[in-house]
Each structure stands twice: as structure tokens, then as C-alpha cells.
Amino acid sequence: MKVRVDPEVCQGHTLCAMNAPDLFALRDEDGHAYAVDEEVPAGKEDLARDAARTCPEQAIVLS
Amino acid sequence: MSNDDPRDKPTISLDRHSPRYRLEFESLATEFHARCPVAWNDTHGGYWFANGNKELFDLARRADLLSNENDVDGTGRGYQGISIPSQSDQANRTRGGFLEMDPPDQRYYRQALNPYLSPAAVERWKPVIDELTRACLDEKIETGRIDFVDDLANIVPAVFTLAMLGMPLKDWDVYCEPVHAAVYTPPGTPDHARVIQLQMRMGMHMMEVMQGIRERPRPGLINELVTLKLGDRTPDDTEIAGVIMLIIGGGFDTTTALTAHSLEWLSEHPGERERLSRERDTLLDSATEEFLRFYTPAQGDGRTITQDCEVNGTEFREGERLWLSWAMANRDAKVFEDPHTIHLDRKGNRHSSFGLGIHRCIGSNVARAVFKSMLTAVLDRMPDFVCDPDGAVHYDTTGVINGMKHLPATFTPGKRLGAGLDETLERMQRICDEQRLAEPVTVRKARAKLRD
């Protein structure tokens, strides 16, 4: 599974990093999120799906 | 609306500033979600009322169709900003900072201020926030009585907001009362004249501080604002004052409202309170988001439609007003199971309490940090608190902020841990100044140090 945060859609709600800190990090200057690694580690797929579901802007793209 | 409007519009008649909106909120939300998730509300001159979660999501993020502009000087499109109804004194309208602007100016402001308010920026302040909370609780801990609004939730957000602005901490009370009272004291009520007086004193103080920082720079949001370039434009004092008031208005009453309601609920649910305290490592984040969802301190925001368009089958026309009801969208059963009940461990809680789209609350990370500091300190130091239902005072109407004026409580007295509030404010002021804590995170990365 691959994961990315669409920077055009993310508004810095921070819920992804709150729910899945291993998968998402926040930029110091504005708190907007990015995926720590494009590849979701084995066993963390459900966590990635939960984070995507929790994003208020629906900015997380799984593929 | 006139009879020549050919559109078939599901129409409601809901005065958001009436007690009915507050008292019947849950049944109204359920009814609207089923019948008219985007309704034409024929009160206050008529406006669209988006309340369904999906419908609100699809509208709120359409910066291409919506404007926040409050055209106070008549040089724009004449739009009325984010308040519905519009400000009553049209001749003396004030713009609510960049929340009543569109890009690119709105974006310039946010880019400049984000490095003061991001999670990394706020994290640096945590020792200061916790110390302010401690001092507030120490003022009351030996008595066994506290008003969670007056003695805690009004003070910590106010002092900390001033700290980030670069204002003198000791002057927090110049701002606290007028900012809260203005929300629940509309024109025509007996106390209004007094509130206006307090607001004038606050405005003068703010202009003096702004001028002082122009002459002798000190770090903080105000320093950023007085040195800011918006493209090739420099904002004047009136515009900057509007931005400072946006930060103060956004930073004070909302966090107070969230904290008071949460503590009231925890008093009514002591089992859940014990569970939250015991399992806070796993529950504190989800509980915070759930309180945010359920109580939605800022109930909604207005917009103006910028072009004739159709979204999800609703035809909108340029110039029409739209209310984005974050509060009702947060109770939509299609997204939130058992929406009218608080579940501290709720999963997938994509609430819209900080708004959606490009105007997402810029202070959301501040709100969470300050709330969590106050909540956990109360759980630790006053674990058996009982709020007095007869003394609790909710805002009469919640058309703008779902707030509380008072929340008295009793608890088993405890021991003080340190100095009182005034002495603590002096010490925190020294620490702010010496460590230049109010610099942006791009300049200063280190956490505040309270002891050598």
C-alpha cells in the first residue's frame, strides 16, 4: 500500500499525525502533514486507512 | 424570497440567535439532515444554511465559489464577511482580520503567522502553559471552590494569547472581560454600554502596544504584523488591529467554551471522568476531538457566493449568503454513529469544529494544547470536582459561540504547589523576555525552560 498527503488539500488539521504518528509527520512551519514513507509498512495498512478516514479535508491518498 | 424565484428551495425559518436554536439543537439537526441538508433560511434577510456533513464538506472547501470578504471600505464587491446577520452598525463595520479576506492577502497573513502557531511552535510553550494553569488552580486549591470559567478557563487562554502576541502578560484583564462579554451582550441589552466602554479601553491599549512594538521591536505575532508585506502592500494600523482582534477573539472565548462544557460533562459522568484520567495516554487525544465535535465552540461561519453555480443539485446565485453550520455537520448520523452522544474513544472523528478549507482555524493547535493542560491539571488536582448545576450559566443564545459565563464547582481541598497568579505572571514575563519565547519556530526551536 502507498500513502501520500495531497499538499493542495491538506489544511493542517493534524489528525493524521495524532492517530498514526508512525505514518505521518507535520511540518514545523505550518503543521501541514506529509507521509513519513510513501510505502505503508506491513501491518500498518489499517492504521493508514483509519487516518485517511479521519482527515477532515480527505487529503490522504491511498493506492 | 420574491415569488419570481423559480428555484425549488427547501425553506426553513430558524433564528440562530433565538433560544430555540440552542434548546432544540439536536432535534433541529436531525430534522434538517433528513429533510433539507442545504436549506434556505428565511430569517435575517434570507441565507443558505448548510447543515448536512457531506453537503457542508462539498461547499466549505470551494474557495473558487465562496468569499469571506467583508468589504468595509466599499472598494470590493460589497460582501458582508462571515457574520449572519451582518454587523448592525454598517457605517462603522470592522473587518475581522484575514478571516474576512480572500486570497492572496489571506494567504500572506497565514503564511506569516503559521510559524508562531504550528504544533511545533506551540509545543515549545508547553511548560509556560502548564505553569499558568498551575497558578490558576493554586489560587483556589485550598478553598475547595472554583469557578472553572472565571478562575481558570478565562485566564489561561487569555494570558497565553497575549504571550504569543508579545503583549504584557499582566494586562490580560484589559482584554478578558470585554472579549467574552461582547459575545453574550448584544446591542440593546442593559450591560451593552459597559461592554462598549471596556472595548474602547482595550482598543486604546492595543494601539499603544502596537505603536510601542513599532518603536521598540519585541518578538511575537504583533511584531510580525507590523513588519509584514502583503505582496507590494503594507497593512495600515486599522487592518492590523483587526487581525490582532481576530487572534484575541479566536483565542479566548472558544477555548473557554470548550473547557467549560467538557468539565461540566465530566462532572455529570464521573465514571467517564475516572476512565479518562486513568487511560489518558490513549484517551486524551480522542476525548479532546470528541468534545470539540460535540460542543463545537464556533458554531458556524458565513460566506458569500461569488458566482451563479450549482453544487449537489442546489442552485446558488452570486451575492447570496451561506452559513456553514460546523455544529450541525458534526451531528450528522451519516458520518458519526450515535451523533448526539459523547464517546471519548470515538474513531474516525473528522469533525469540522475548526472549519474546513483554506480558513481552518489557525489557532487550532493552541486550543488543543491549552485545553489539554487545563483538563489534565483539573483531573490530577481536583479529581472529585462536582459542578453546581444551579450556578452554571450557559450563553442564552449560541448563534455564534456555544459558550458559558460561569461554572462553579466544589472539590476536596488540596495543597498549593507554587506561587499565585500575579507572581507567576511576573516570572513568566521575565522568562518570555529572556528566552524570546514569542519568536516563530523558524527562528527559535528550543522549548521554554522554567528553571536553570
Image (spheres, rainbow, N blue to C red):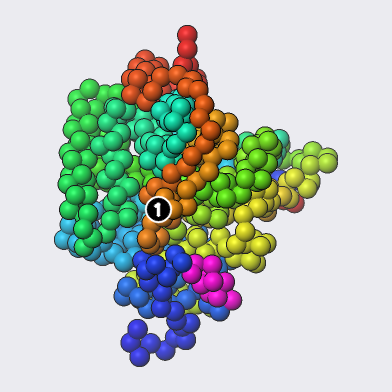
The answer to whether residue B146 is above or below residue B322 is above
Q: Residues within 10 Å of mark 1 (few under 14, many from 20)?
A: some
The answer to whether residue B107 is above or below residue B442 is below
On screen, residue B251 versus residue A15, left or right, reads left
Corner quadrant of residue B170: top left
Q: Position of residue B381 (x, y in %)?
A: 55, 30
Q: Is mark 1 on a helix, strand or loop?
A: strand
- The reply to whether residue B53 is in sight is yes
Residue shown at 41% from the left, 19% from the top = B419
Which one is in front, B66 or B44?
B44
Question: Principal SS element in the magenta part?
Answer: helix
Residue shown at 35% from the left, 20% from the top = B423
Which one is in front, B246 or B445?
B246
Amino acid beneath label 1? Val
Which one is in front, B65 or B87?
B87
Q: Where is residue B116 in the image (x, y as percent from the top left)?
A: 43, 33
On screen, residue B378 versus residue A52, left or right, reads left
- Quadrant where the N terminus of chain B sits is bottom left
Q: Position of residue B346 (x, y in %)?
A: 67, 51
- The stretch of residues the image draws in magenta is B24-34
- The reply to whether residue B283 is in sight is no
Residue shown at 32% from the left, 73% from the top = B44
| Residue B28 covered by magenta stretch | yes
Q: Where is residue B317 in the image (x, y as percent from the top left)?
A: 39, 75
Q: Could you tell me which chain the residue with mark 1 belongs to?
A: B
| Residue B151 covered by magenta stretch | no
Residue shown at 57% from the left, 50% from the top = B268
Please name the residue that numbered disc 1 is placed on. B393
Which one is in front, A63 or B442?
B442
The answer to whether residue B337 is above or below residue B4 is above
On screen, residue B335 versus residue B81, left or right, reads right
